[in-house]
Image (tube, coloured by chain):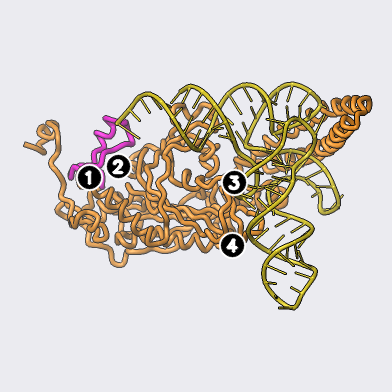
Amino acid sequence: MLSRQFVREHPDEVRAGLALRGTETVDIDEILETDAEWRELKSRGDDLRHERNEISSRIGELKQAGDDEAAEAAIEQSQALKAEIEEIEERADELEDRLDQSLLTVPNVPQEAVPPGEDELDNEEVRRVGFDPVRELPEEVVPHYDLGERLEILDFERGVTVSGGGFYFLKGDGARLEHALVQFMRDLHREQGYSEVFPPIPVTSESMTGTGQLPKFADDAYRVGGHNDEPYEDDDLWLCPTAEVPVTNMYADDTLLGDELPLKHQAYTPNFRREAGEHGTETRGMVRVHQFNKVELVNFVEPESSDERLTGLVDEAAAVLDRLELPYRVSLLCGGDLTFASAKTYDLEVWAPANDMPDGPEQGGRWLEVSSASNFEAFQARRIGLRYRPERHESAEYLHTLNASGVALPRVMVAILEYYQNPDGTVTVPEALRPYMGGQERIEGHEPIGEAAVGAGRKE
RNA sequence: GCCAGGAUGGCCGAAUGGUAAGGCGCACGCUUGGAGAGCGUGUUCCCUCACGGGAUUCUGGGUUCAAAUCCCAGUUCUGGCGCCA
């Protein structure tokens, strides 16, 4: 959330930021009006309270002096003030609530370097890595969902059987590959100075609000024990939509010491997303699912260094793709494509060669976003109450938070199954992963299970 | 789940209805030949150009002219009992 003071003092910057994002639903003028009105009431209430405090302490003195008559008069005076104060403060509280509610819906102000634009087509490609040369691919690259089912390492149908659409089973070497990727990433990020946490998976509404998932994006998350459309309280729980939520909130209302920063945490967790209204042919397979694993990188830094840290963070996430030797590109997001809380974001998109998309690279295939590295500046810290003390004697300030996926598992697996695919339908295990798969070099698939396979001629 | 006892500043800790002691830490100033000790000031949030003011004893309600203090509800910690993968 932006600070009231900032909005009050830089309304034009806030308006410009909204325009760059294409946000039209936020009325800054109304917020400024409410703020002015609130300050007026607050100041009047403070004055009346001051008067009453003085009378009140006089009552104490008079009582002790034994002057009951004067005390009685003062008590009456105090009582008269009480009603007036109550009325004014009630109105002030109401305005303040409204102000806070409104401010929660104002997105972060994009940094100057953020290019204008409406959607992902206006993002600026920063660099492209790993295309020169690319690995030799089969004539026709089989999409991961077909290949995975053929190899019996992915099973979408049985995911539907137990949990419904958008859920899937990993089987045999598929499951093994998943775990290998997780361990590989954790080791890599540990080398990069990340200390690991394993957070709780259900998170409170308060935490969801802290990082900016609520109040606007309730439909994207799964709520435990209630429907998303119903009103929610602070003690409602939601299934972790990204480890950003528990990890960024873990030091809520705490003050970190200056010499503890930058603090870098990594967290491997499952993530749950409803993906409401995101159905279509391009979402076949594991590209858009309701549950997936991800290793998340969260940074807590001093304000002066957050911009520099963002580029470092991009490199740390990209190192995963570098070591897996997967081609990818890095893009700077335009204003219209920024998420709510972010002031600046770089996307990492891996190359999945099977399905040709119009906006894919000239080699064919498509880009799959595997990580978004964002600088939230103090936007989340202010909502969460996340401060640091630069020096022991100095007062605490809001710190800056950043995060990036390091990286999302299913899409990397898609890239591996398609990019490391061989003409004979097997998949080569990237060298970096082999130590995590007992030295296995190739995924050759498994026998299907169940009599349906016999009928289909895939089993005797 | 039940019973009991707790929650006060960065930390420790006092105050049982009259408006939050004291100590430690840290910073600055004074003092000193220097260091230490000593003394002073500061070390939450909000409003105000400022002077100043308001709020704040885990959270939310209530009683009262007045609540850290009394009452109700919740959160959480500790101990005991019960249950449990």
Q: CA distance from mark 3 to mark 1?
A: 45 Å
> As drawn, is A124 to the left or to the right of A304?
left
Q: CA distance from mark 2 to mark 1?
A: 9 Å
| Amino acid type shown at disc 3 | Gly
| Amino acid type shown at disc 2 | Gly
Give percent across and percent down for residue A175. 24, 45
Determine the colour of chain A. Answer: orange
Asked if both marks, 1 and 4, belong to the same chain, the answer given is: yes
Q: Earlier in the sequence, mark 3 or mark 1?
A: 1
| A154 falls in the magenta region | yes
Find disc 2 in the rendering and name its residue: A285
Give percent across and percent down for residue A5. 70, 49
Residue that extends furthest to the left in the rendered view of this protein: A460
Q: Secondary structure at mark 1?
A: helix
Q: Nearer the viewer, mark 3 or mark 1?
A: 3
Q: Are marks 2 and 1 in contact (CB under 8 Å)?
A: yes
B78 lies above or below B24? above
